[in-house]
């Protein structure tokens, strides 16, 4: 748990008034999280900047991090930046840092620093390639301020986990000179049919994150209006981005392309799934599946391609061979569940236990049966797992990649297990996928189960 925000003395407060930083910030305590808000402008100046600074200060006061604010580019020295866990570029515009200051910021990011770009941060430093890569895309143009629908693509990241799949709001919606999707992980995009003036051919990212040259980066194109900073949903969006950038929340921010949904939060997508054994999963209005009772399993019986599984009915497709399976999950406390792969089609959940493999969800069990383990066969790398794991009540993302008889597991973008099947009675080369409901006292939730089939290769 972070220490509460430090109460600043009047002298320290005076030193960090907007545009008045004349020396390094006060020393950062061992357990103190500290954020610098930078809002210098050399081009258009947004009149919402004061509201933005006030909002970040308020978020810091409630979430336990200290906030300093400046428009003095002289704050960008290696010595001063070392005091901060993240720097928020709040609607900066134009060329705001000289060569030495740019060099200090590059070193800061490469040493693990965090970056948060808000709105016109994309309208900044067009001739500095490092910054362009960090921000993810440069501003091109914008239509008039108007309502639009934001499609939330990632509902596990802390910046978007509390949002509905469709987020309707009013802002100034930027068009960008390039699409960041290939290099960054898109969290949310604009539905260009919901407003006028979009120029990105229907694929219009508006918020994204990435790990960049050693640091963490989050950008949101929202935040033009003063009203944005009083909007609870936008404030939570901004807070989640800050929490990711400072390392207080973990997320998978690798680019994600080419996946198709197996479960997209709708009742219609559940029609291809079957419950095996006792217990069940309930579907909430926000598209979350939550386990109850058990020991049972909900497994995907839809066809990955044409054909049907031998001996199990024409409505069941063949199993998956080589693939990357991603899903988001959350526990409410000390709960037990898991993701099964590589098992034969069956309405008996014990068939999956005895013939497939389970990637476990249960952080308090013994090493070979704890979160990230191949249950009963191989422990996760526990130090890496512990650093990557979000606590109960927060979302996590698994990637389970099966290629031949090799099974690898990523937790929030960090690889924590690499297992190869050597049991002749089991095979990962052709099987099904499912999620477990373990027992009456276990409450585990799942969202956005998606898959990308990969070229078949041996070990």
Image (cartoon, grey):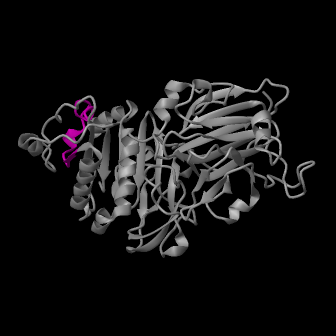
Residue at (66% x, 30% y) in the render: 374
The residue closer to the viewer here, 293 or 101, is: 293
- Residue lying farthest to the right in this orientation: 311
The residue closer to the viewer here, 28 or 182, is: 28
Q: Quadrant location of the N terminus?
A: top left
Residue 273: which quarter of the image?
bottom right
Residue 270: which quarter of the image?
bottom right
Residue 367 is at least partly visible in this image? yes
| Residue 170 among those drawn in magenta | no
Residue at (50% x, 58% y) in the render: 188
Magenta residues span: 67-83
> Quick check: 395 above or below 419?
below
> Quick check: 15 above or below 143?
above
Horizontal placement of 34 versus 185: left or right?
left
> Quick check: 111 above or below 233?
above
Q: Position of residue 365 (x, y in %)?
A: 56, 29
Residue at (20% x, 48% y) in the render: 69
Q: Quadrant location of the C terminus?
A: top right
The residue closer to the viewer here, 354 or 454, is: 354
Residue 231: which quarter of the image?
bottom left
Q: Position of residue 5 (x, y in %)?
A: 22, 42
- The mark total stands at 0
- Residue lying farthest to the left in this orientation: 11
Residue 129 is at least partly visible in this image? no
Q: Position of residue 43 (x, y in %)?
A: 27, 59
> Quick check: 317 above or below 195?
above
Horizontal placement of 225 versus 456: left or right?
left
Q: Position of residue 389 (x, y in %)?
A: 49, 36
| Residue 77 among those drawn in magenta | yes
Horizontal placement of 178 versus 94: left or right?
right
């Amino acid at each position: 748990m972070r220490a509460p925000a430090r109460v600043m003395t009047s002298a320290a407060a005076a030193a960090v008034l907007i545009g008045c930083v004349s020396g390094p910030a006060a020393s950062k305590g061992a357990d103190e999280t500290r954020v610098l808000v930078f809002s210098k402008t050399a081009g258009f100046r947004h009149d919402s900047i004061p509201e933005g600074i006030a909002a970040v200060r308020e978020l810091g006061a409630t979430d336990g991090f200290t906030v300093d604010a400046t428009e003095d580019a002289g704050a960008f020295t290696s010595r001063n930046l070392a005091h901060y866990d993240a720097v928020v570029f709040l609607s900066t515009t134009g060329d705001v840092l000289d060569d030495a200051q740019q060099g200090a910021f590059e070193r800061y990011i490469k040493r693990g620093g965090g970056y948060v770009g808000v709105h016109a941060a994309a309208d900044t430093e067009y001739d500095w390639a490092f910054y362009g890569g960090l921000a993810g895309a440069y501003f091109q143009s914008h239509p008039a301020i108007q309502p639009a629908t934001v499609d939330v693509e990632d509902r596990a990241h802390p910046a978007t986990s509390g949002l509905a799949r469709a987020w309707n709001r009013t802002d100034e919606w930027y068009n960008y000179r390039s699409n960041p999707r290939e290099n960054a992980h898109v969290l949310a995009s604009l539905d260009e049919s919901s407003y006028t003036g979009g120029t990105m051919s229907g694929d219009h990212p508006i918020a994204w994150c990435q790990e960049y040259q050693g640091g963490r980066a989050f950008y949101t194109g929202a935040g033009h209006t003063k009203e944005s900073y009083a909007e609870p949903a936008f404030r939570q969006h901004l807070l989640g981005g800050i929490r990711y950038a400072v390392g207080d929340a973990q997320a998978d921010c690798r680019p994600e392309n080419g996946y198709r949904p197996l479960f997209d939060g709708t009742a219609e997508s559940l029609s291809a799934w079957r419950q095996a054994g006792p217990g069940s999963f309930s579907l909430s209005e926000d598209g979350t599946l939550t386990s109850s009772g058990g020991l049972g399993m909900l497994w995907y019986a839809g066809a990955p391609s044409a054909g049907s599984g031998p001996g199990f009915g024409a409505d069941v497709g063949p199993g998956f061979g080589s693939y990357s399976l991603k899903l988001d999950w959350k526990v409410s406390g000390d709960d037990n569940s898991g993701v099964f792969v590589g098992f034969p089609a069956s309405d008996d959940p014990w068939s999956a236990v005895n013939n497939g493999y389970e990637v476990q969800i249960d952080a308090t069990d013994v090493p070979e049966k704890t979160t990230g383990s191949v249950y009963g066969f191989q422990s996760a790398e526990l130090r890496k797992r512990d650093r990557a794991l979000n606590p109960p009540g927060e979302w996590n993302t698994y990637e389970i990649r099966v290629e031949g008889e090799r099974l690898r597991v990523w937790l929030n973008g960090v690889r924590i297990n690499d297992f190869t099947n050597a049991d002749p009675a089991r095979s990962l080369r052709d099987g099904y996928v499912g999620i477990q409901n373990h027992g009456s006292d276990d409450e585990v939730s799942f969202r956005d189960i998606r898959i990308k089939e990969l070229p078949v290769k041996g070990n």
